[in-house]
Image (cartoon, rainbow, N blue to C red):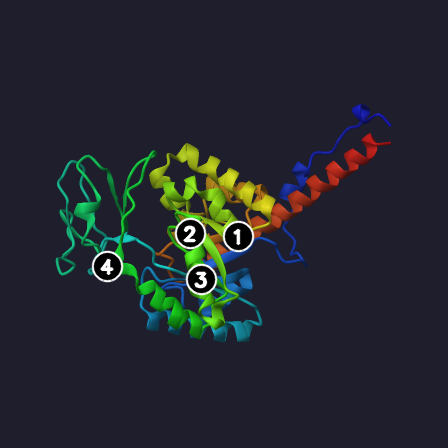
Amino acid sequence: MNSNHLLLEEPIRMASILEPSKPSFFPAMIKIVGTLGPKSRTDEVISGCLKAGMSVARFDFSWGDVEFHQETLETLKTAIKSTKKLCAIMLDTGGPELQVVNKTEHPISLEADTKVILTPDQDKKSTSNLLPINFHGLSKAVKKGDTIFIGQYLFTGNETTSVWLEVDELNGEDVVISTWGVRNSIDFLSLSYTRHAEDVRHARSFLSKLGELNQTQIFAKIENIEGLNHFDEILQEADGIILSRGNLGIDLPPEKVFLFQKAAVYKCNMVGKPAVVTRVVDSMTDNLRPTRAEATDVANAVLDGTDAIILGLKPCADCILLKLSQQLEKFVQRRKKFSIKIYTSRKLSNMLENQ
């Protein structure tokens, strides 16, 4: 039969888009990683997130102490028992993050064309003209003319180079892994600011000395130019890759972040290692629905082969994390339907062409 005379059906009928969504018996293959924070750690919210599809709980040690995260984890264990839903544990190391120390916990507004002083004296009060930071060596790490991006975190650099800060003051992450990590038998270690394959090898060697964590998988977090330049060798050593789009967006212009994302996800798929994407549906921290652009962003990431989505914004409050989980579950379910139809349509077309 000549396939040129066939009227091929589109991958998904336009009319079906308007049909009510039906619950699926099969769970979505795309995993949702939820960050449990100060306002998303109650039993009610965590249980709701587990029911909505969260399958990995992320504990971000760039903020909060060991006791805080342990209390949250105990609540998670209770929620797992009550909901009968499995959930893995991911420990996200602090890494060399430069943070603005704002003890007032109130937003700080910066005015254009005004002078702002960065000081390592954390006892100083944060104002629009004076910002205490958690690093004493910044003055030696940067030079006149370097650009510093100021937000919750500090970033330096540009598209061609980013200043690597040798932060010796954050070696406490080894202590966190060997104490909190061992005590709770973490499933995944998110290795922040991975620059070279040696970073992964060093982490694996450290974990191998901790008998309880020798099976813990290491996910390399690509956040800057160094990690991007050495991506292939990092991919060979790591168990999975996390694309930190927020931080990459500082070193790279927006039009290049998506190119790197597509190339990185493709390479992960080719070697059979998970690719995880961050910074999705950010507007839902203030709104109950995502923007249309955010919905399309998630769908395209999943269609490209992304294996998991991280919900990692710090200001997740009350039921926002729950709403995010529910919304993402809808996205990935619709994507699965779309992919099955594409596969079936292509397979049918190939069969007819071979006749």
The residue to which callout 2 is attached is 198
- Which is in the foreground here, disc 4 or disc 2? 2
Report helix, strand or loop for mark 3: helix
From the image, which quarter does the N terminus lie in? top right
10 Å neighbourhood of mark 2: few (<14), some, or many (≥20)? few
Which residue type does callout 3 highlight? Ser
Q: CA distance from mark 1 to mark 4?
A: 31 Å
Q: Earlier in the sequence, mark 3 or mark 2?
A: 2
At mark 1, the secondary structure is strand
Quick one: which residue is furthest to the top in this view? 4
- In the rendered view, does 346 fall on the left or right side of 41? right
- First in sequence, mark 4 or 2: give its number: 4
Q: Is residue 143 left or right of residue 72?
A: left
Task: Return the x and y of residue 81 as percentages of the image width and height.
Answer: 54, 75
* Numbered disc in front, either 1 or 2: 2
> Real-space Cα distance between discs 1 and 2?
25 Å
Q: Alpha-carbon neighbours of circle 3 within 10 Å: few (<14), some, or many (≥20)?
A: few
Which residue, given by chain and number where applicable, does mark 3 sit on? Answer: 205
Res 299 visible = no
- Label 1: few (<14), some or many (≥20) within 10 Å? many
> As shown in the figure, which amino acid type bears the numbered disc 4?
Glu
Residue for badge 4: 105
Q: Secondary structure at mark 2?
A: helix
Q: Are marks 4 and 2 in contact (CB under 8 Å)?
A: no
User: Picture coordinates of residue 92 (x, y %)?
Assistant: 40, 60
The amino acid type found where label 2 is placed reads: Glu
Instruction: Please state which amino acid type lies under the numbered disc 1.
Output: Ala
Residue holding disc 1? 308
